[in-house]
Image: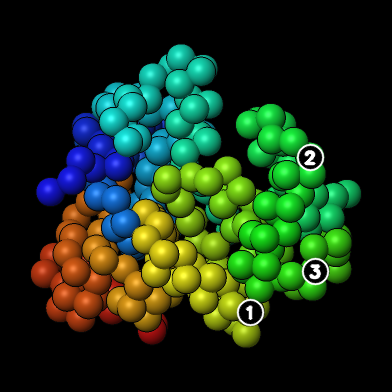
C-alpha cells in the first residue's frame, strides 16, 4: 500500500454543544475516488472543510501528502494550494471573465506570470468543454457552465486532491450531466477526489469507495455498489430507503 495522500486521525469538531465530527479516522490513497453520503447535517461539509482548514478542528490530526496541518499560516496556505475545493455555489467573481477567474489564483498566490497563467487557464477551460466561453462573464453562463469554470479554477492550482461538496445540487437537472462528465474525466486521469454527492449512479460508477456518515461519524464504508445495494448498518439502510436513484 502507498502512503495515504490524506490521513485523518481522531478528528473532532463541535459548534457549542453540537458535535459535528466525532473522532473521525480516514485514510485516502492516491487516485482514490471517495464518495461521501449521509443525511443533511451529518458532518459531510465539515469533514471536507477541515481538510483544507476552512474549518478548524477542535481535536485530531490531518496530514496531506505527509504534511501535518497545524495552525501555522504558512503550512495552511501550502496545504490549501494542494487541496482544491468546489462548492455547491460557484462563487465566481462576477466582474471577471471565465479565463480571468481561472487565471487569478495562480497569479496572486503562486506568482505565475500573467501571460502564462492566462494561457494555462484557457487550456483548463478547453479541458472542461468551455473553449468558446473563455471571455464570457459568469452572468452569461448557465449554472453547469459556471460550475465547470469553478472546477477549472480549482485545477489551476494543480492540486493533488480535489474536494467536491454537492457541486451538482443547485443545478437544473439537465445541467448535472455536463458537470459529472468533467468529474469523471478527472477521475480517469487519476485525480484523488473526495465527492459529497446525492448522485448515487455517479457514486457507483466513478467511486472507488463510499462512506456513509451519520451524526458526525463514519457509520459504514465499502465498495460503492456494495454499500448502496446491500447496506449493512440499519442507519445506512434507513437513509438509502429514503433516497431515490
Ligand atoms: P452536512 O454537510 O452533512 O449537511 P455540515 O457539516 O454542513 O453537514 O453540518 C453539520 C452540522 O453542523 C449541522 O447541524 C450544521 O447546522 C452545523 N454547522 C455547520 N457549520 C456551522 C457553523 N459555522 N456554526 C454552527 N453550526 C454549524
Ligand atoms: Mg453539506
Q: Residue at x 60, y 82 (%)?
A: 173
Answer with left or right where residue 102 lies relative to residue 154: right
Choose mark 3 or mark 1, whichever is in front: 3
> Measured from the top left, where is residue 210 in percent x and y?
26, 63
- Judge whether 181 appears above or below 158 on screen: below
Residue 88 in sight from this viewpoint: yes
SS category of the residue bearing label 1? helix
Q: Is mark 2 within 8 Å of ligand 2?
A: no
> Measured from the top left, where is residue 97 in percent x and y?
84, 55
Marker disc for residue 175: 1
- Judge whether 74 appears above or below 185 on screen: above
> Measured from the top left, where is residue 32 in percent x and y?
29, 58
Label 1 Cα crowd, 10 Å radius (few <14 / some 14-19 / many 20+): some
For marks 2 and 1, the one nearer the N-term is 2
| Residue beneath disc 2 | 114
In this view, the residue in front, 171 or 157, is 157
Check contact, mark 3 vs mark 2: CB within 8 A.
no
For marks 3 and 2, the one nearer the N-term is 2
In this view, the residue in front, 241 or 183, is 183
SS category of the residue bearing label 3? helix
Q: What sort of colour scheme is used for the picture?
A: rainbow
Q: Residue at x 61, y 48 (%)?
A: 156
- Judge whether 122 appears above or below 112 on screen: below
| Residue beneath disc 3 | 133
Amino acid at each position: 500500500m502507498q502512503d495515504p495522500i490524506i490521513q485523518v486521525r481522531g478528528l473532532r469538531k463541535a459548534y457549542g454543544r453540537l458535535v459535528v465530527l466525532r473522532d473521525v479516522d480516514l485514510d485516502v490513497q492516491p487516485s482514490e475516488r471517495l464518495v461521501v453520503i449521509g443525511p443533511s447535517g451529518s458532518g459531510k461539509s465539515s469533514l471536507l472543510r477541515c481538510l483544507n482548514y476552512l474549518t478548524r478542528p477542535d481535536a485530531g490530526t490531518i496530514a496531506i501528502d505527509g504534511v501535518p496541518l497545524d495552525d501555522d499560516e504558512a503550512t495552511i496556505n501550502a496545504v490549501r494550494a494542494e487541496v482544491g475545493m468546489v462548492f455547491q455555489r460557484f462563487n465566481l467573481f462576477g466582474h471577471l471573465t471565465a479565463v480571468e477567474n481561472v487565471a487569478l489564483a495562480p497569479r496572486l498566490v503562486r506568482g505565475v506570470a500573467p501571460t502564462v497563467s492566462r494561457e494555462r487557464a484557457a487550456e483548463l477551460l478547453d479541458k472542461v468543454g468551455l473553449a468558446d466561453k473563455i471571455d464570457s462573464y459568469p452572468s452569461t453562463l448557465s449554472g453547469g457552465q459556471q460550475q465547470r469554470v469553478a472546477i477549472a479554477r480549482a485545477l489551476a492550482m494543480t492540486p493533488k486532491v480535489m474536494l467536491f461538496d454537492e457541486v451538482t445540487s443547485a443545478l437544473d437537472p439537465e445541467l448535472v450531466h455536463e458537470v459529472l462528465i468533467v468529474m469523471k474525466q478527472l477521475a480517469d486521469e487519476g485525480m484523488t477526489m473526495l465527492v459529497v454527492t446525492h448522485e448515487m449512479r455517479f457514486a457507483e460508477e466513478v467511486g472507488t469507495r463510499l462512506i456513509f456518515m451519520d451524526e458526525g461519524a463514519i457509520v459504514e464504508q465499502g465498495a460503492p455498489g456494495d454499500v448502496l445495494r446491500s447496506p449493512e448498518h440499519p442507519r445506512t439502510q434507513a437513509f438509502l430507503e429514503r433516497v431515490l436513484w
